[in-house]
Image (cartoon, grey):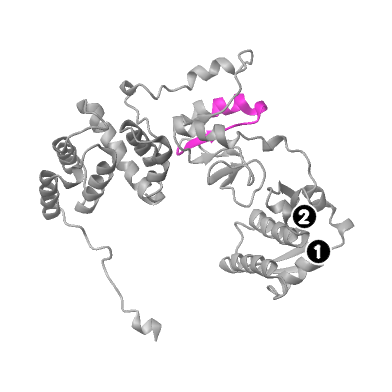
Amino acid sequence: MEIFTDASASGWGAYSKGQGTHGFWDSLDKKEHINFLELKAVFFGLRCFAAEAASCNILLRIDNTTAVAYINRMGSIKYPKLASLSRKIWQWCESKNIWVFASYINSKDNFLADRESRTQSTETEWELNNQDYNTVVYHFGQPEVDLFASKINAKCRDYISWHRDPDSMAVDAFTVSWSCFFFYAFPPFSLILRTINKIITDEARGILIVPKWTSQPWYPLLSKILVDRTNPSTGRFPYVDGRDCLRKAYQQRGLPEEAVDTMIRSISHTTLRQYQTTYKLWWDYCTQTNTDYFNATPHQVIQFLQQLLVTKSHNSGTFNSHRSALSLLLSGNIGNDSDLKRYLKGIMRLRPTKPKYSTTWDPAPVVK
């Protein structure tokens, strides 16, 4: 494989196998030296065009001699920042068993990558400002995927780009099913109708940002995709993730708004995702039994767990996880209720936690 890369003051570009891609620098990158940006363009080019490659050789064509030297020598001691970035490039290649060699190319011969790096059209880089975005998230919950984004304006950790992008999970959102995640979409205005049709086709759920243009042909279609999240009679789980559930619970308890996010940050992202399963099951139970979602008694929690014991094959560890999740959600100190503790001890006897591994091996021979 042969990859051409280039960097300019405005952005980076890469070209390979008849296809080009580009991106723009954020405010921090714009302050960096051009040598650093050239190396970064190389890294982005590799991640865009060689993400699926393995066990191969790649020729890098670069019009910057410093970048060529740092890649071929696997770093240097003169400029630690350049050495650190070149080390990251080689570690990434090593993980895929890829060998790279950089070759200098004259700038006038590197016109394809140079053209990509100097692209000035920023029509695709529109975004909602962070303050308004935070307001949207506060009301509707944290989305999982930004469908129309790039490296410099993505609102979610996972995003889908329009062009090849070093960190995007996919290219072109319309080639991916939207039904498996809670999305955030602020599409280009020309793609709004196509976006609405995709939501209807995939029966997807998420946050869509569009202008209030009542004269547009797509505007009447919005009524087909709107969901009333405030109406529990729909039976749908109204909260996006564990963070959303706990935020609502803390708000109902009258905690200061500025302290709610601080309290939620005390819980890891992995734990919140695990608790999400409990909160969905608890919502279904509350809908069936007309139980207050945020103010239940320990005996109602026991009845909920007993229902799971009958219908699910959970082990005792999972039931303890349910108890921990609900103790954060519900008012009162249900985690220390004596009846609930006794009930969980009974589950431990009925369904003891299975060993994590069926077999083990001695690491001593390997170490030796």
Q: Secondary structure at mark 2?
A: strand
- Magenta stretch: includes residue 118: no
**Image point 21% across, 43% down: which residue?**
312
Find disc 2 in the rendering and name its residue. Answer: 7
Which kind of residue does numbered mark 2 sit on? Ala
Could you classify mark 2 by the number of other residues whose Cα lies within 10 Å: few (under 14), some (14-19), or many (20 or more)? many
**Residue furthest out toward the right:** 108
**Image point 21% across, 60% down: which residue?**
354
Residue 64's disc is 1
State left or right for residue 208 relative to residue 58.
Answer: left
Where does the N terminus fall, quadrant-wise? bottom right
Q: Are marks 1 and 2 in contact (CB under 8 Å)?
A: yes
Above or below, comparing residue 268 to residue 99 in the picture: above
**Stretch in magenta:** 180-198
The image position of residue 309, as x and y in percent, is 17, 43
Q: Secondary structure at mark 1?
A: loop
**Image point 38% across, 49% down: which residue?**
266
